[in-house]
Image (tube, rainbow, N blue to C red):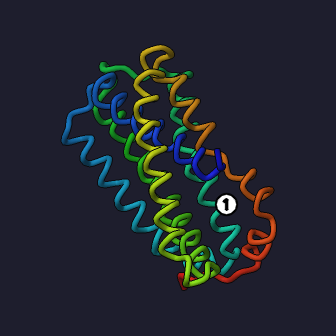
Amino acid sequence: MEPGHVWFLGNSIVVTVFAVFVLRELALPSWAFGVALTAGGVGGFVGAMIAPRVGVRLGAGKAFLLGRVLVVIPWLVLVLVLALAPLTADTGVAVVLVIVAVAQFVYCLAMGIEDTNDISYRQSVAPDGIQGRMNSTIRSVNRVVFFFGTLLTGLLMTLLGFQATFGIGARRARHCRPRHRVLPAPRRAARGHRSLAA
């Protein structure tokens, strides 16, 4: 499986287990979960706003890699928190809300940085004649992978529990380096490429 699709698999796992864990295991009220998702929306907006500057400073390739690295951090931190100080339904709503909101903010911030630079660069280097086929193929495969990833998540949570499933998803979501070994030339160019989102 191409590393970009492996990333989508990992992303589908962590996003799915995150919602189930927070709402069922931690019994976070729906209003509080909505607040956490709002924090994610703010993070995504901020990430998209600063993405052009990040791309100009680092180059589109490095900005893309930065986003891919940052997107894993909240999930790995959450796994660490669960290991050191397990969260339960008895944990105060305020404590859980802060942790969940911060995780969502950082996750969506990273997505805003990564998506803006990645897609802008991809659109700029792909010939006009294959734009439709390229984007439809990428999106179709990614969505299929995401669908099966959510089904796999249910099985993993049932057999292994929340913490192990978070860890598996986070490890899959950090897959980005193999992609550069497969496509070295475009990525070398991207490292020196100024952000097209600017």
At 56% from the left edge and 64% from the top edge, which residue is drawn?
A: 114
* Mark 1 element type: helix
From the image, which quarter does the C terminus lie in? bottom right
Tell me: 90 left or right of 126. left
Residue 106 visible in the current orientation: no
Task: Check the image and report above or below for 59 versus 4.
Answer: below
Which residue ends up furthest to the top in the rendered image?
159
At 52% from the left edge and 47% from the top edge, which residue is drawn?
A: 8
Counting from the top left corner in percent of width and height, residue 163 is at: 51, 23
Q: Nearer the viewer, residue 30 or 20?
A: 20
At 42% from the left edge and 62% from the top edge, which residue is drawn?
A: 44
Tell me: 17 left or right of 160. left
Would you call the spot at circle 1 few (<14 residues within 10 Å), some (14-19), or many (20 or more)? Answer: many
Residue type (three-letter) at the residue carrying disc 1? Leu
At 30% from the left edge and 36% from the top edge, which residue is drawn?
A: 94
Residue at numbered disc 1: 65
Counting from the top left corner in percent of width and height, residue 27 is at: 26, 26
Q: Nearer the viewer, residue 6 or 85?
A: 6
Counting from the top left corner in percent of width and height, residue 153 is at: 44, 29
Q: Quadrant of residue 25?
A: top left
Residue 46 visible in the current orientation: yes
Q: Nearer the viewer, residue 59 or 128?
A: 128
Tell me: 153 left or right of 23. right
Q: How many marks?
A: 1
Task: Check the image and report above or below for 46 versus 68.
Answer: below
Task: Check the image and report above or below for 32 versus 198.
Answer: above
From the image, which quarter does the N terminus lie in? top right
Q: Nearer the viewer, residue 41 or 130?
A: 130
Counting from the top left corner in percent of width and height, residue 90 is at: 30, 19
